[in-house]
Image: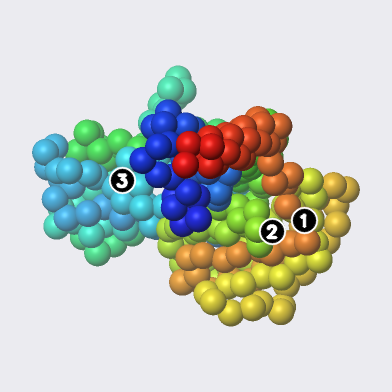
Amino acid sequence: MIPLNIVNSFNKKTPIFYVRIILLASILFLNPLSTHAFAQTSYDMNIPTGAASPDAPYFWQSEKDGSTSGIIEILVGDTVVWKNADTATHTVTAITESEENVALFDSGLFAPGKSFSHTFTEIGDYPYYCIVHPWMEGTVIVTAGYSIIPHVGKQVGDGSVSFDVEYSFNRVLSTAMINEEKKSITFEIIGNTNSENNELELRLPSELIDGPFVIWVDGEQLSDFELVKDGDLNVLNIELDPETQIFTVIGTSIVPEFGSIAIIIFGVSVITMVVLSQRNKLSI
């Protein structure tokens, strides 16, 4: 929002060009950042009712992130559980290009209400489909290491400073919103899991945010968490409830509040306001 004292400083003698400059500079100066995006566990991939029809709106639904593409990204050692919620029988069969044409995994036919699971032990992309309904295709992407929220801080100041935030969790951290005034980062969590391990490992660069830290989860301050220094990283281990959707990390310092361009724009807006104010006084 634009402060009322700035809005009220405009009058009919103020050139609209300068008004627009001040409005733009105020928005750039005042708006907070909003940046838009696994422990070993299992993830459900549901086959919805009607998936046997090639005209179905979608054939899979991942409870991890709500995706209906049939594509799911997991870590080495994770398990995918395909659940048949359709009224037809299906298979989950790996597509292979090997000469032996032996699938890495094959559920065989499994009836409505049944499920099939497979644990992935090697990095790679594993396309799969239903033999009975070949239009039902998907891919399991198996990676090692940490998941990443890229370019956190890109929209702070002039955007010249940003960081990739790494984490390991059984759900997806989709958003990192920076509040410069409160020196905090709020994370949004999406998806579901049936894992009993709901510990989040969050690796925050100290140049992005530094502690000591206070953590708020579901409107309450969390006192039971672990902080470990790993070089220039603050590694937080936080136990979260499966229903948690938002949590906030508050530090004592945050990524530099303004970049050079933002400072120039704000400075220009202030000078413009002063000049306009003096012109208005002279014209009275």
Q: Residue at x 44, y 50 (%)?
A: 7
Tell me where residue 20 sits by quadrant.
top left
Q: Could you tell me how far apart the alpha carbons at marks 2 and 1 are, in whole angstroms?
A: 6 Å
**Residue occupied by mark 3:** 68
Q: Earlier in the sequence, mark 3 or mark 1?
A: 3
Look at the image and tell me whether residue 123 can be seen: no
Kind of residue at disc 2:
Lys
Q: Nearer the viewer, residue 49 or 95?
A: 49
Which type of secondary structure does the marked residue at label 3 adopt? loop
Q: Could you tell me how far apart the alpha carbons at marks 3 and 1 are, in whole angstroms?
A: 39 Å
Q: Earlier in the sequence, mark 2 or mark 1?
A: 2
Which labelled disc corresponds to residue 253? Answer: 1
Which type of secondary structure does the marked residue at label 1 adopt? strand
Q: Nearer the viewer, residue 42 or 1?
A: 1
Q: Could you tell me how far apart the alpha carbons at marks 2 and 3 are, in whole angstroms?
A: 36 Å
Q: Residue at x 50, y 55 (%)?
A: 5
* Rendered view: 251 above or below 219: above
Q: Earlier in the sequence, mark 2 or mark 3?
A: 3
Q: Nearer the viewer, residue 4 or 44?
A: 4
